[in-house]
């Protein structure tokens, strides 16, 4: 009986890992994005060559790109020297002063270590973090759609250094990145649509 328990646990763990790798992971690496968006080149792709991790996520927002940009900058913490601000309840106007505030070379605070590589309000934001364990790029593209709507596309690319620390960083980002980015995208959508 003692020998049977470890083998059963091993099988359970192997089954869970296979389920994650074959079903859950492919879904969260492209949450909301269509095939064209997943395979298209995006600004910032050249910053991380041959990524070991790439995720492209997308969502349609019922608001114009300028409004989405303002909330992206505010709620994403994409302001030099400012941590992300929490979303508040109720209807708010988008923060006008934050629409154009980013520029190339700005270092984002709050412990992220990201540096702005490209800022084209209200269409494109590209950031990169070059750390000891990995190089990570984050690109956000806002594409105008019909009827004043916007397609918000996030792409994250990571190239980790060989070794335990790089592998650990990749493993932590695999799930953690999805949870954080999905929550951020849904919050930006909610805030931007609340002012329409």
Image (spheres, rainbow, N blue to C red):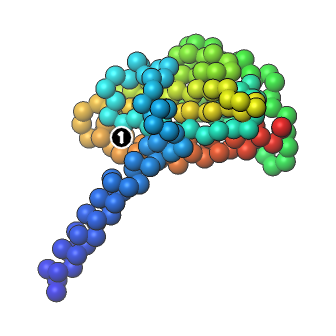
Residue sticking out furthest to the left: 3
Q: Nearer the viewer, residue 26 or 82?
A: 26
User: In the visual, does 150 lie left or right of 140?
Assistant: right
Residue 99 occupies quadrant: top right
User: In the visual, does 124 lie left or right of 133?
Assistant: right
Give me the residue at 38% from left, 23% from top: 48
Quadrant placement of the N terminus? bottom left
Give me the residue at 72% from left, 33% from top: 149
Q: Total number of numbered labels?
A: 1
Q: Position of residue 177 (x, y in %)?
A: 48, 43
Residue 165 occupies quadrant: top left
User: In the visual, does 148 lie left or right of 78?
Assistant: right
Q: Secondary structure at mark 1?
A: helix
Quadrant placement of the C terminus? top right
Give me the residue at 59% from left, 22% from top: 125
Residue sticking out furthest to the front: 146
Q: Position of residue 179 (x, y in %)?
A: 52, 48
**Is 160 drawn above or below residue 80 in the view shown?**
below
**Is 164 drawn above or below residue 79 in the view shown?**
below
Q: Position of residue 158 (x, y in %)?
A: 38, 32
Residue 170 occupies quadrant: top left
Residue sticking out furthest to the top: 104
Q: Nearer the viewer, residue 182 or 146?
A: 146
User: In the visual, does 136 lie left or right of 117?
Assistant: left
Give me the residue at 21% from left, 79% from top: 5
Q: Is residue 108 visible?
A: no
- How packed mark 1 is, by other alpha carbons closer than 10 Å (few <14, some 14-19, many 20 or more), is many
The residue beneath circle 1 is 170
Q: Is residue 16 visible?
A: yes
Q: Position of residue 173 (x, y in %)?
A: 42, 42
């Amino acid at each position: 009986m003692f020998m049977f328990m470890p083998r059963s646990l091993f099988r359970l763990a192997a089954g869970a890992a296979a389920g994650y790798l074959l079903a859950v992971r492919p879904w969260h690496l492209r949450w909301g994005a269509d095939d064209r968006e997943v395979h298209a080149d995006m600004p910032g792709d050249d910053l991380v060559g041959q990524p070991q991790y790439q995720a492209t996520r997308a969502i349609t927002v019922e608001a114009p790109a300028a409004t989405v940009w303002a909330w992206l900058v505010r709620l994403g913490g994409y302001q030099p020297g400012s941590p992300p601000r929490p979303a508040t309840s109720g209807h708010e106007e988008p923060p006008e002063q934050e629409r154009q505030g980013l520029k190339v070379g700005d270092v984002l605070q709050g412990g992220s270590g990201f540096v702005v590589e490209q800022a084209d309000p209200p269409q494109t934001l590209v950031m990169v973090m070059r750390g000891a364990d990995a190089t990570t790029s984050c690109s956000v593209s806002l594409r105008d759609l019909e009827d004043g709507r916007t397609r918000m596309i996030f792409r994250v690319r990571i190239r980790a250094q060989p070794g335990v620390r790089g592998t650990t960083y990749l493993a932590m980002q695999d799930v953690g990145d999805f949870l954080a980015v999905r929550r951020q995208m849904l919050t930006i959508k909610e805030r931007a649509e609340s002012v329409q």
